Image (cartoon, coloured by chain):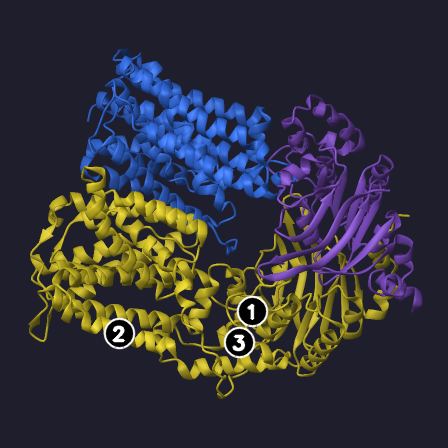
Chain colours: A purple, B yellow, C blue
Amino acid sequence: MNALLEVDALRVFYRKVEGLHRASLRVEEGSVVTVIGPNGAGKTTLLGAIMGLLPSSGAVRYAGAELAGVPTEARVARGLCLVPERRELFGELSVEDNLRLGAFQRVRHGERDAMRDLAAIYARFPRLEERRAQLAGTLSGGERQMLALGRALMAKPRLLMLDEPSLGLAPRVVRDIYHIIADLKRAGVSILLVEQNARAALQVADRGYVLETGQITLEGSAAELAANPRVIESYLGLAARSAGA
Amino acid sequence: MRGRVLLAAFLAFIALAPLVLPPFYVTLFNYIGLATLVSLGLVLLTGVAGLVSFGQQAFVGLAAYTTAVLTTQYAASPWITLFAGLAVTAAVALFLGVITLRLSGHYLSLSTIAWGIALYYLFGNLQFLGQYSGIDNVPPVALFGWSLDTGHRSYYLIWCVTLAALIAAQNLLDSRSGRAIRALRFRSVMAESFGVRTASLKVVVFLYAALLAGLSGWLYAHFLRFVSPQAFGVNAGIDYLFMAVVGGASQVWGAVVGASLLTVLKEWLKDILPRLFGQSGSYEIIVFGVLMVLLLHRTRDGLMPALARLVPPPRVPPAVAAAPALARRGLPPAGERLLEVRAAEKHFGGLVAVSGLSFDLRSGEILGLIGPNGAGKSTMFNLITGVLRADAGEIRFGGERLDRLASSEIARRGICRTFQHVNLISSMSVLENVALGAHLRGRQGTVAAMLRLERAEEAQLLAEAARQIERVGLGEQLHQAAGSLPLGRQRVVEIARALAGDPVLLLLDEPAAGLRFAEKQALAGLLRKLRAEGMTILLVEHDMEFVMGLVDRLVVMDFGEKLAEGLPREIQRNPAVLEAYLGGIE
Amino acid sequence: MNLDTVLWLVQDGISNGAIYALLALALLLVFAVTRVIFVPQGEFIAYAALSLTMLQAGQLPGTVYVLVGGGLLAAAYEIAAALRARAGARLPRVLAFYVLLPAAIAVLAWWAAPRKFDLWVQALIVLGLVVPLGPILYRIAYQPLANASVVVLFIVSMAVHYALTGLGLLFFGGEGLRSAAFSDAQFKLGVVNVTAQSVLVVLASVLVMLALWLFFTRSLYGKALRATAVNRVGARLVGIPAELSGSLSFLLAAFIGAVSGVLVAPIATIYYDTGFLIGLKGFVGAILGGMASYPLAALGALAVGLLESFSSFWASAFKETIVFTAIIPVLVWRSLTSRHVEDEEE
C-alpha cells in the first residue's frame, strides 16, 4: 500500500512554546489510523499543522506532494479535510447552507454536480434533513457533530481527519459516529482519527500512535497497542483498573 | 550598568541642550517634550493596557482652553488654572471612560474619534472660546517671580514635568498595580480571578493618560501663549497615537523615541515635500501613513525593542529581598460545609454544558471532579469562579451566594484557581506572574506606586511569591519569562500563583497534565500537605492514577449532569461510570 | 418652523441618511469579515465624488494614478508571495487583475475625459476607477496583517486614511468641488416639493441594499462571506480562502463608497478630506444600531441623517458636535446592559 499521508519530524511552536516535537506518522491509502494521548499532548496541534492552520517545520507529504507553503483551502481542494474538535460550524447559517458551503472548493472549481451530494448526506443523516432550515447554532451536541461530519463529507475527502469525534456525545451517538467511520473506510476514504476514547478508536483503527507531551512515544498495529500494558494502564484506564481491582 | 550610563547621558543632554542650541531647536525640543507627555499616556493606555485612543488631543485641548479662558478673561494665576484644567480633563475623561471602557475595545477607539471631532467643532464655534481664531495673549507661567516667557525658559519646566512623568510611569509599571495593568490586555479574565477590578483599573489608566494629555495642554497654552482649534484636530490625535506605536507602545521610553522621531520628521517633511510636489499642503500625512503601514507590517512592537537590544540586560537579576511575611487568612475548621452547588445550569445555544448539577465540598477535603472530555467540568469551574454566570441554580460559599458576584469579588472571599489553558503573562517573569496572584494581599495603589511609597509592601509581595515558587519546586526559574517554560511547568506556575493568593478554597483545572511521573508525585505530595494544613481543594483531572490516590471523594460528571458521587473505590466499580468512560461501541 | 420646513428637513435627512445607511452596511460587513474598522471607506466617497466632478470638467481625475500605482504595488506583493511559494501558475490572473484592468480603466478614463459624455456614463467610469481600489488596498495594507488584532488593524486603517487623504490633496487639490445634478426636476408630492435628486439617492440606496441582501442570501459567495464572518476557522476548513473573503468584502465596500460618492457629489461640496466625516457618520449610525445587526445599523444611519438635517436648521454651527455626541446615550445604555470580561486575542 502507498502512504497517502506522511508526516516527518513535524515541529510546531505555539506562542514560543513547543507544542509538537518532531512527530512522525504515516497513513496508508484506505486505512484508519488513530492517534491517542492525554489532553494537552498536542493532538489538536498535530492536525492543525497538517491542515496548514498552524505554522510548522518538518515535512508533510500528502498524495506524493510536499504540502509546505500550500494554503489550507488548497489542501481542502485536494481532499484533505478536518472535522475539528470544536466543530467550527457556521452557527448563524442554516443547516443546509452549512452543508452547501462544505462543497465550496468543489463548486469553485466548476463541479456542477456537487449539490447533488446533499441528498446522499441527508440519506446518511436523516436528522439533518429534518432540520435543514434550522440555524446550526441551535442544534444539540450530537446533531452538531453530524453536521460537522456531513459538511466535511460534502468536500469529498480522500483523507478525513477527525478530532475527538466522540467528545461530549452520548454513547449511542458515539456508536453511530463510529459506524459511519467504518462505513467510510469501506468506501475507500482514509481516516486519521484523534481520540481520547482510546478503546473506541483502537477498535476501528488499523494502526495507532500514542502522542504524549508533544512526542510520539509508541506506535504499532491497533491490536498491538490495545494489548500493550502501558496503553492499558494509561488510556484504557478505568476499565483495566476495575477489571484488576 | 550601561542602562544607567545611557540615562545619565540623556539627562545631561536634556540639561545642556538649551545652552548650546539655537532657539529653533529649543522650540522643537519643547514640542517634543509636550508630545512625549501625551504619547506616554498612550504607551500605558494602548501599548500596555491594549486600549486605543485617537482622541487624546481633545484632552490636551480641554486643559489648554480651560487655562486660556481663566487666565485671559478672569486673570487667574496659571498655577490655579493648572488644577482647574486637570479637573475639567479628569471629569470629562472619567465620564467617557466609564461609558466606553466596559465595552469591546473598538467602541472606545471609535468613540475617541467621535468625541475628538465633536470637541473640535465645539472649540471652533463657541463665541467665548474665540471660535476658529482662538484665544491669544495667554500669560506665561511665572515661577518665583521669574516669568517663563521665552522658549528657553519654558524648556526646563516642560522637560522637568516630562521626565517626572516618565519616571513615575516606569515606577508604576514595576509595582502591584503595574502587574495588574499589564494583565489588562490579554489576561483580563485571569486578573479578575485574582481580584483585580479590571473595569475600574481601565478607567484609572484612561484617566492617567488623559491627565498627562491635560498637563501637556496646560504647558502648551502657556508656552505658545495662544490656543486655537487647529492644534486639537483629529489629525493631532492620530499623530500622538502614531508616536506611541513608532516608539514601541509597550515601553515607557518608547514615548520619547516616538515623539522625537515624528516631531522632527514632520518639521523636515513640511519643509521639503511642498517643494517636491510644487504646491503647498500638508503632504507629510502621506509619508506618515505609508511609514506606519510598513512599520506595522514588519513589527508591531515599534522601534524600542531594537534600541533596547543595544543595552544588555543586567546579567544577575536582583535577588528577592527577605521581607516580613504577609498576614494570612484564617481557615475554617475541618469538615464544615464550605461550598454548596445546587441545581446549577448552563447552556450555550442548543448545547447543555451543565445541567442540574448539585454537590457539596467540605473544608479540609480534596474533591475530584472527573468525567469524559466535554462533560462540563471546566464550565462548572467557571461558574464557581464567576467567569460565567449560571442560567439557574445556586452556588454558595460559606453560606453566601456566589452566583451573582463578579470574579474579582469571588476572589476576595478566598477562592483561587488555575486555568486549564495556561493563562500566564508570557513576557513577565515567573516571579511577577506569581506576585500577581497575591494582588489582594496588598493595598497600595497607583499613586503610591508612582511615588515609590509602596516599597515595603512590594518587598513582602515579592518575597511571598518567591516562597510559593520555591514551594512548587521552580526556584531556579524565578526570573525567567513565564512564556519560555515548557507547558507542564507553566501549569505549575499557575499553582504557585493560586497559592500566593492565600486561598481557603483552591480550584485546580488539570494540574498534572503534561507533567512527568516524578513531577506528578511531587505535586500530589504538595497537595496532601496543603490539605493537612487545612486547605480545601477542588480538582479536575484526567490522570486517574493521580486522582485515585489523592482525593477524598469524587464527583463524576457526564453531559453536564452528575453521574455518580462517592469514594474513589466505589466510583471505580460503578457500572454507569464505566459505561460513560468506555462509551462502548460494541 | 412650519410644516413645509419640517417636511423639507425630513426629505433632506432621509436622503443623507440613505447614504449613511449604505456606508454603515459596508463598515459592518468589512468589520464582520475581516475585523478591520474601515475608516478609509470615507476616502472612496471623496475620490468618487471628486473624480466625477473632474470628468464633468473634461479633466482626467487623479484617481487613475492611485489606481494604476496601487495596482502595480499590489501586483508586486503578489509576485513576491508567488515566488516565495513557487506558485507561478497564478501570476497571469494576478497581472490581469492588478495591472491590466487598472491600466485599461485608466486608458478609458483618459480617452473619455475630454469628450464630456453623459453624466451616467461618467458615473460608470468613476465606479470603474474606484471599485478596484478596494481589493488593491486590502492586498497592500491589510492582507499581510491577516492575523493581527483588531487594535493593530484599526491603527493601520488610520494610517491608510492618512495616506489616501494626502494623495487626495495631491491629486485633487484643496478646493471644494460640486458636481452637476443628475436631474434638476422637482415635483410636488402632496404639500412637499420633492427633488428628483433626492428620490434618486433613496432609490439607489434601496436598490443597492436589495442587491446586497440577494447576494448574501442566495449566492454561494455571499454565504461564504457570511460564513467567514461567523466562524473564521470553520471557513478555512471548508476551503474558503481568507484572502478571497477579505478582497470581496473590500470590493463591496469600495463599490458602496463609490456609489455614495456619486450620489453625494451633486448635493454637497466635497473637499479631499470630506469623505472622512461622511464615512464616520456611517460609523455613528452603525454604533447607534449596536455594531451587529444590519437593519438596526441602517435605521441608526437614517437617524443620523435626520438629526443632522434638523440640527443644521436649529444650530448649524454645532451640527457636527451634535451628530458625533449622539453616540453617548447609546454607549451609556450599552455599557449599563453589558457585563462581561473578555480577552483580546493575542
Q: Nearer the viewer, residue B580 or C94?
A: C94
Residue B70 coordinates in the image, percent (x, y): 12, 59
The local secondary structure at tag 1 comes to helix
Which chain is indicated by disc 2? B
Q: Is residue A152 above or below residue B265?
A: above
Alpha-carbon span between mark 3 and mark 1: 8 Å
Q: Secondary structure at mark 3?
A: loop
Q: Is the N terminus of chain B in the top left, top right, bottom left or bottom right quadrant?
A: bottom left
Relative horizontal placement of residue A120, taking residue A16 as reference (left or right): right
Q: Is residue B307 visible?
A: yes
- Quarter occupied by residue C105: top left
Q: Residue C48: percent from the left, percent from the top?
A: 33, 27
* Residue A162 falls in image quadrant: top right
Chain ID, mark 3: B
Residue topped by disc 2: B11
**Image side of residue B249 versus residue C311, left or right:** right
| Circle 1 Cα neighbour tier, 10 Å, few/some/many (<14 / 14–19 / ≥20) | many
**For discs 3 and 2, the disc positioned in front in the rendered view:** 2
Residue type pointed to by label 1:
Ala
Which residue does the numbered mark 1 point to in the structure image? B482
Measured from the top left, where is residue B48 in percent x and y? Answer: 42, 62
